[in-house]
Image (cartoon, coloured by chain):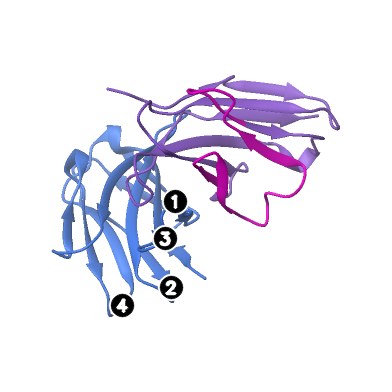
Chain colours: A blue, B purple
Amino acid sequence: AQSVTQLDSQVPVFEEAPVELRCNYSSSVSVYLFWYVQYPNQGLQLLLKYLSGSTLVKGINGFEAEFNKSQTSFHLRKPSVHISDTAEYFCAVSDLYQAGTALIFGKGTTLSVSS
Amino acid sequence: EPEVTQTPSHQVTQMGQEVILRCVPISNHLYFYWYRQILGQKVEFLVSFYNNEISEKSEIFDDQFSVERPDGSNFTLKIRSTKLEDSAMYFCASSLGGLDEQFFGPGTRLTVL
């Protein structure tokens, strides 16, 4: 069985500061890794994904994440946040080889950016 | 840009009533999913659907739930007899292939009274 742990439920930061949202996963099989963002009253939007290859993945809105297999982590980072980055961020995994399979989500991290 | 749409955006129903949540996936996608998010909790997988049959379902997806693709465009989730604990945001998603990115709709907020 797969599981995802997002270590911080809330992360308050000031505008233009760097941020890291932490995600650890456990799985007995090879997985895809994802970060989704949910703005207030909206659906989930894919920020970035890791399938294979380079462990540093760049996504939309200046976000990037690094896959660390030995630490089973996939932390999300941004060097300088904006007010508009305020949202809920979800880390997720899915089975690498099973088509049409579930995304398993973490509990989410609320990023609050203030001026 | 193509997107997944869901109707209604908010549905209020009485306990014990049947509800049908509707989704229009992206037109050329072949895999369809339902997820739910109870307020303040994580997003949970309910079911995936491919080639007119369920390909995977979670423990949450019990006999009171069913899914259907009644025509070439809609994908529905039916809850036969709603319970208070069914109150949640329900998200539909679709993907082109089974290992491709899942695109999510904006959700339907279901409130069971």
* Cα–Cα gap, marks 4 and 3: 24 Å
Quadrant for the C terminus of chain A, please.
top left
* Cα–Cα gap, marks 3 and 2: 14 Å
Residue drawn at x 33%, y 59% as measured from the top left: A33
**Letter of the chain that mark 1 sits on in the rendering:** A
* Cα–Cα gap, marks 4 and 1: 27 Å
N-terminal of the pair, mark 4 or mark 3, is: 4
Would residue B58 be counted in the magenta stretch?
yes
SS for callout 1: loop
Look at label 2 and name its amino acid: Ser
Look at label 4 and name its amino acid: Gln
SS for callout 4: loop
Q: Position of residue A103 (x, y in %)?
A: 45, 53
Q: Which residue was labeled with disc 3?
A: A98
Q: Which residue was labeled with disc 2?
A: A27
Look at label 1 and name its amino acid: Gly
Q: Which residue was labeled with disc 4?
A: A71
**In the rendered view, does B74 fall on the left or right side of A39?**
right
Q: Position of residue B86 (x, y in %)?
A: 72, 40
* Cα–Cα gap, marks 2 and 1: 17 Å
N-terminal of the pair, mark 2 or mark 4, is: 2
Q: Which residues are magenta?
A: B47-76
Q: Which residue was labeled with disc 1?
A: A100
Q: Mark 4 and mark 2 in contact (Cβ < 8 Å)? A: no
Is residue B47 in view? no
* Cα–Cα gap, marks 1 and 3: 6 Å
